[in-house]
Structures are given as structure tokens and as C-alpha cells.
Amino acid sequence: MSIRIVGIGSALPEKKMTNNEIAEMVETSDEWIRERTGIVSRHVSTGETVASLAADACLRALEQAGKRAEDVELILVATCSPEEALPCGACQVQEKIGASKAVAFDINAACAGFLFALHTAWAYVEAGIYENALIAGSEVLSKLVDWSDRGTCILFGDGAGAVLVEKCDTGGLMSFTQHSDGRKGFVLSCGNRQLSNPFVRPMHEEKYVQMDGREVFSFAVKQIPLTIEEALKKANLTPENVDLFVLHQANKRIIEGIAKRLGVDISRFPMNLERVGNTSSAAIPVLLDELHRKGIIRRGQTIVLSGFGAGLSCGACVIEW
Ligand code: UT7
């Protein structure tokens, strides 16, 4: 028994921000950003929230599947940038789309969040607890980024993608693997509200993304080929058997490095980061939706998904679409 993606959708904020607009705010250039990352523009919220984007993406996934919100049993929202500590984004999505029967909660594994949520849904279905799940990756990272830090503000974008998965007897999710290394947490971090109570006053207010870009880069290029090979081995497959590698959209050079290490032609690594930037947990489902709408993804194909980022966390899975 496994799970199969039966519906997919995405939602991006209306406002598009180009590299040139960022170059008016910090010392950088369109040329530098394109060359070092592959990013040309990204969508930035002017009011859209993690919950509103996730709800829009979920409604599109349901519509594409021809299914009703009332029949959804589980809603998982992967996010590291919720507007509210309470209630969780998934409960807000439940209310917005009218999925009254569903159990809803959030998962935070940063850029690996969508994959970890997909694997969690698989576990619930495999255990016989639920038969379907709506899984969204949704981020409004623009509020976590220091817009005076050129090392990070050029990278990220806002958006959401969602899939509806259902129990299936053949195909679907064939294998997965996931890893976390909390010892490297300092490499990519973002503060939250500091301890403040009658006994303790906050020492400092550091609430923006801090990143050692080179460390993240080298972690991804070294670890992801191994993680993908691990997932493929579990499915008794090799990279040659894979039609498409849909990876977290962090940096074009990272994806090129992974393709090279796997010995796979870059043409099998579709990208959309030039138009959306790094949308963390939303990156994989946003790209999947785009590829599906363009007819690039078709039933029966073997697809590898892989995400990596803060934690440090990473994962990969093999699916038969
Ligand atoms: O989802 C996971 C999230 N994180 C990531 O995926 C990040 C992965 N890392 C990266 O994508 C890259 O490390 C960056 C794009 C962040 C940086 O690229 P890099 O090639 O690793 O640059 P660097 O940090 O080694 O910096 C090289 C130079 C430095 O100048 P000096 O010290 O050589 O004079 C930086 O100060 O480039 C400078 N620099 C910039 N210059 C123009 C850094 N950011 C910029 C910028 N514009 N935006």
C-alpha cells in the first residue's frame, strides 16, 4: 500500500520583485545574482499570508483532483514562517477551505518540510489511520529576511504549493529517506520571540535569517546525491531509471553540482528558481504543479523529489506519478 498524488495546485503572491529592484536597496547587481544563484525575480507578499497562500494552493489541488474539501481526512502544512504562533496554519487552512472532517497540524522542517510532510502522510495511510491527505508547503519568508543583508535577501521568495494524496495499491510513493543534523543548526537560523517573563528580560532581539551560505551550499552538493542514491536503492532503481529530478530550488549551481555528482544530464533537473527564488517548503510542490500544468510530468513516470535546508535537514523520495 502507498500514497499517490491525485491533485496538485500552487499560489504565488501577485507582486513580482526583480533583481534590479533589490539592487536599489542593497549593494548587489542583477548580473551577480543571476550568475551566483540563477534567480532573476521572485514573488513577494503584499498581504498574502502563509495560511491564505496554502488555502489557495489546496483549493486548486482539490479542484484539479475533482475532490471535495469535506472528504479530506488530514491536512499538513509545512512552513517555517507562520504569521501566528497559534492557531497553526493547517487549522486556518481547514477553516478557509471548509474541510470540516480533517485533522490539521503544521510541520516545520524548513526547506525539507514538504517532503517530511509527504512522508508523514504516507505513514498515516500505511498505518491504516487515514486514506487521504492534503499537504501544503507555504512560506512568507520575506518577513523573516533582513532586507539590508545582501547575502540572504536576494535568495528567498514567497508562495505555496499543495498536493492531494490518496491511498493506492500500486505505484505512488515507492521509497523515501530523511535525515536531520541538529549539530549544524547554526548554519541557517532565524530567531523568534525571546524569553520574556517576570524573571527574565530579553537580551537582544534577533529575528532575521542568519546564514552561512557556503556551508549550506557544500552540505547540499555533498549530501543530496547520497540521499537520492539511498532512496533509489530502496526502490531498486538507479539514477538512469529516473525521468525527472524535482529538487528544492535553492541555487542553480547547487542543482548543477548535484546532477554532476549523480552523473545525470542537467536536462532531467527542471528548474523554476529564476522566476520564484527559493520558496523553502513551497519550492517542490510549486515546481511540480508548474511541470504538471505544462504536461512535462505524466502518469507512469519515475520522479525523484529531494529537499534540503535548515536543521540541517534533508530527504528524498521516489514516486511513480
Ligand atoms: O534552502 C537553503 C537555503 N540556503 C541556500 O540554499 C544557500 C546556499 N548558498 C548559496 O546559494 C550561496 O552560498 C550564496 C548565493 C548565498 C552566496 O554565493 P557564494 O558564491 O557562496 O558567495 P560567497 O558567500 O562566497 O561570497 C563571495 C563574495 C563575497 O565578497 P568577498 O568577500 O569575496 O569580497 C561576498 O561579500 O560575494 C559577495 N556577495 C555579494 N556580492 C554581490 C555576497 N552576496 C552578494 C550579493 N551581491 N548579493
Image (tube, rainbow, N blue to C red):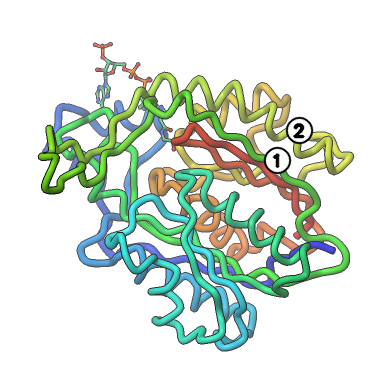
**Residue 147 horizontal side relative to residue 321, left or right:** left
Expressed as whole percent of the image width and height from the top left, the position of residue 235 reads: 85, 43
For the point 47% across and 70% down, the residue is 57
The quadrant where residue 155 appears: top left
Expressed as whole percent of the image width and height from the top left, the position of residue 65 reads: 64, 79
For the point 83% across and 39% down, the residue is 234
At label 1, counting other C-alpha atoms closer than 10 Å, the crowd grade (few under 14, some 14-19, many 20 or more) is many
Q: Quadrant of the N terminus?
A: bottom right
Q: Nearer the viewer, residue 172 or 292?
A: 172
Quickly name the residue at label 1: 177
List the single residue furthest toward the front.
199
Expressed as whole percent of the image width and height from the top left, the position of residue 311 reads: 47, 35
Q: Secondary structure at mark 2?
A: helix
Residue 36 seen by the camera: no
Q: Secondary structure at mark 1?
A: strand
Contact check, label 2 and label 1, Cβ < 8 Å: yes
**Residue 83 horizontal side relative to residue 205, left or right:** right
Task: Say which amino acid is labelled 1.
Answer: Thr
Give the Cα separation between the discs numbered 2 and 1: 7 Å
For the point 49% across and 42% down, the residue is 249
Say whether disc 2 or disc 1 marks the residue closer to the N-terminus. 1
- Residue 282, compared with residue 19, is above or below; it is below
In the image, ligand 1 is in what quadrant?
Answer: top left
Task: Say which amino acid is labelled 2.
Answer: Glu
**Residue 280 horizontal side relative to residue 291, left or right:** left
Q: Nearer the viewer, residue 50 or 180?
A: 180
For the point 65% across and 39% down, the residue is 178
Quickly name the residue at label 2: 230
**Residue 206 horizontal side relative to residue 176, left or right:** left
